[in-house]
Amino acid sequence: MTIDFSLYLVTGRELLPPGKEYLESLEEALQGGVTVVQIREKRSDTLEFLEIARESKILCAKYKVPLIINDRIDIALAIQADGVHLGQTDMPVHVAKTLLPAGTVIGVSCSDPDHVKKAIEDEVDYIGIGAVWSTTTKKLVSPVVGVRGVGSLLQALDGTNIKAVAIGGINSTNALRTLHGSVSISGHRLDGIAVVSDIVASSAPRSAAQRLRNIFDAWVHHFDVQSRVTQVYDVGTVKDGVVELMQVIRDKSPLIHQITNVVVTNQSANATLALGASPIMATASEEMHDLSRIPGGLLINFGTITNKGSMILAGQYANEAQKPVVFDPVGVGATQFRRTTASELLNAWQASVIKGNAGEMASLANSNEVQAKGVDSVGSGFADPASFIREIAKKERCVAVMTGPTDWVSDGVTVVKLENGNKMLGDITGSGCLVGTCVATFCAGASLIAAAPGTSPGPELAKLVRGNMLIGAVGGVLALTVAAEFAAERSDVHGSGTFLPALIDELYNLKPETLLSRAKVQVL
Ligand code: 3NM
Ligand code: MG
């Protein structure tokens, strides 16, 4: 049989809220749009499991929803379940197949590439990838896979008919992030999301299920239909877009919330003001939620990592509010701590733009082609930067920006090559951080002119960010690099000390015409 895996409920009677009966909860969940149910009874005797399975089967049949039994082949046989779900230490698939009637759906839990390889050899029907987030519902025996880890496991299923769901800690707050971030480079997406506590522990399981189902359906529609219509750019549309954003920023003065490092906080705030936007350099976790409600953008620069908790919260709230999240992983290759933190942050939220120099981007991509020293990259960069930047954008599911003598921007399809700037940018501290600030500011502008949520139907709600982040990223890079050219040419600039204030001046005075007169843009 074919199963719709969109919303896969795994039961957990021990999580029922006080006063909620199991069957009542299950029926409400079915009414809310659960598409498949797995009965998971870890603590009951055989007789009790059998009774629960029988009663559940009657209910599921009423809603024409297939029923899967966790672990116990005998129970599945006894009630003629539609399928079984097997963990890595349960009955081996090839043995289960000899016992079960042909056509019984078989699913396996997978948390690493070897599990997936074995599941493919065993010709299972589906896999449950987990835990994607940490969870207290099940005692985990392997490390959390993380949203970014799901994609490579999914990619191994390319060319097979095996379906896949993610499980572990999924709820209505992180479901969209989970779905978006788990798509593989090859474009393989999840077939569904599996949850226990978000539905079972709810006193309103019908609405809990409905929320998840709506998110899944809207996202799939967006992914399968909308995102296939790829936008085609040329130099004219890119430049026009940037000019429009310059004006929007000055007219609407979006709030640019920046959690950044102590070295550059002041100059970043001044650059934001110079562009016409409004900076706030807030770092206390208690204020992250309030700030996410104000239109604008978020910059997370981890040049000094002292506010990791706030960085996680701010990004998650920004995703919920569909606001741009620009991530500047300063010096990520320099220490193990930075690498671990970058991975933790990128799993916690979906970056809209990741911006780094060649060394930083190489480190994020686990490439040894470019080495990093401290926060600077050394050497000449990638042999094929255009392909590299396109791949990392695809892998991270966002726009990627790689700065250097030539700057590269990609959304995973289009690559924009930018060749403005001046070598004096290398003589002051934090010029890369200023690019991050300018990108966050332009992306905030882009989100302000995008359709507001609620004004357009479903698919708009299936996005983690509103607005054209490619144009935002290009705009931010161009503003800073063109301003740097004008600053370096000034007769009152005598060295790096006078260059920095001149750079802020030139950002302040930058006009669409002057930007266009200098902008060296190529669309590849
Ligand atoms: N299997 P919740 S995690 C049943 O990683 C189960 O294979 C997992 O519960 C795996 O949605 C999990 O409440 C529990 O986090 C999921
Ligand atoms: Mg098991």
Image: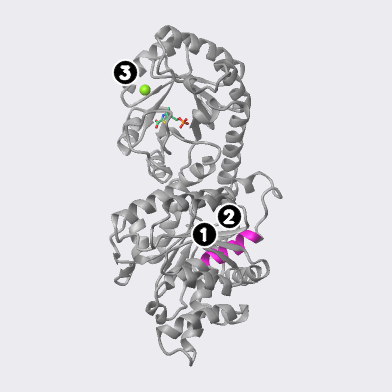
Report the amino acid beneath label 3.
Answer: Val
Which of the two residues, 261 or 207, is positioned nearer the viewer here?
261
Residue identifier under label 3: 95
Residue identifier under label 1: 282
Residue 34 sits in quarter:
top right
Name the residue furthest top.
47
Q: For the residues carrying marks 2 and 3, which lies nearer the camera in this image? A: 2
Whether residue 460 sits left or right of residue 326 in the image: it is: right
Assign a secondary structure to mark 3: helix
In what quadrant does ligand 2 lie? top left
* Spatial CA span between label 2 and label 3: 55 Å
Q: Which mark is residue 291?
A: 2
Judge whether residue 516 can be spotted in this image: no
Q: Residues within 10 Å of mark 1 (few under 14, many from 20)?
A: some
Report the amino acid beneath label 2.
Answer: Leu
Measured as percent of width and height from the top left, residue 59 is found at 58, 15
In magenta, the rendered stretch is 439-448
* Spatial CA span between label 3 and label 1: 58 Å
